[in-house]
Amino acid sequence: MRALVTGAAGFLGSHLCDRLLAQGYRVVGMDNYLTGNAANLAHLRSSPNFQFLLHDVTNFIEVQGPLDGVLHFASPASPVDYLEFPIQTLKVGSLGTHKALGLSKAKTARFLLASTSEVYGDPLVHPQPESYWGNVNPVGPRGVYDEAKRFAEAMTMAYHRYHKLDTRIVRIFNTYGPRMRPRDGRVVSNFIVQALKGEPLTVYGDGSQTRSFCYVDDLIEGIVQLFERGGPEPTNLGNPQEFTVRHLAEVVLRLTGSRSPIVERPLPTDDPKVRQPDIRRACETLGWEPRVSLEDGLRRTIEYFRGIVG
């Protein structure tokens, strides 16, 4: 089996490359390093089964030889990134998805789209099942990411229905682990870096908003299972255990031994108040559920950040 992973130098893309290679795939990784990091793939450069292509997926994609799968992970994915690169975010979700689907069609390859829980917006239904259509502000600052992924899902289903392409859509909920970027705007990495540096932990609002945190190894396992034996309908992957942001801050302080204070800042525009996946579809169709507890996952992530935060 030979697969292309777009966004291969990113947090999730690089872990996915590792997992596919470990399972015997030959992997072609593609990235333009807009938000990806070459260091995430450095350990794979000597692998005979890994090939890297420096390319922007919003342009025509050409890959020599057969492909069995295309896994489309290219996109800025944190608030800091997609607010800094709003046009690129919209382009990779629209043009990039179109180019990746076109390659899948040309190669008769299975296609998997990395979508997001952000398609649900600030949800009015809790927890969020795949049948929920969402509550999204299309013209708010977060709309560039939310609507790019909603369009990408629609394009993927159009190729499935019209071209009979074998497709998958994974809706990814908050995920954390090694290879996250410091200061990437995600709450787990922000808290860990602030705690390790002795800086105040920044909570937006009063910290009562909730998130569900899935460790990266669990998520990647679910993605590979979905790719290999899932169906075309969107599938939530994430950890259904729900925590307040303030609770997360307190756990990070305890695990790092930091004495940093917690400070409150104004809530960003359209920041979701709740976020919790309904994973019944993944449980029933894939037999998948997360196994790594929040504390175990945070310990592994803190260990990683201790090695890179000066």
Image: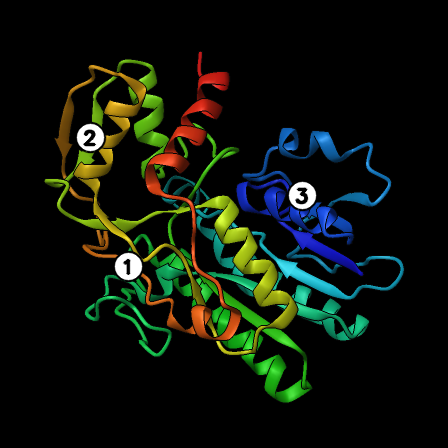
In the picture of the structure, the residue carrying the numbered disc 3 is 18
Disc 1 + disc 2, Cβ < 8 Å: no
Give the crowd class for mark 1: few <14, some 14-19, many >=20 residues within 10 Å: many
Q: In the rendered image, which quarter contains the C terminus?
A: top left
Q: Which mark is residue 250?
A: 2
What distance separates the C-alpha of mark 1 from that of mark 3? 27 Å
In the picture of the structure, the residue carrying the numbered disc 1 is 276
Q: Secondary structure under badge 1?
A: loop
Give the crowd class for mark 2: few <14, some 14-19, many >=20 residues within 10 Å: some
Q: Earlier in the sequence, mark 2 or mark 3?
A: 3
Q: Is residue 303 left or right of residue 43?
A: left
Q: Is residue 161 left or right of residue 293?
A: right
Would you identify the image quadrant in which residue 79 lies? Answer: top left
Q: Residue at x 37, y 74 (%)?
A: 130
Q: Residue at x 17, y 43 (%)?
A: 267
Q: Residue 255's spot in the image, x, y percent?
A: 30, 24
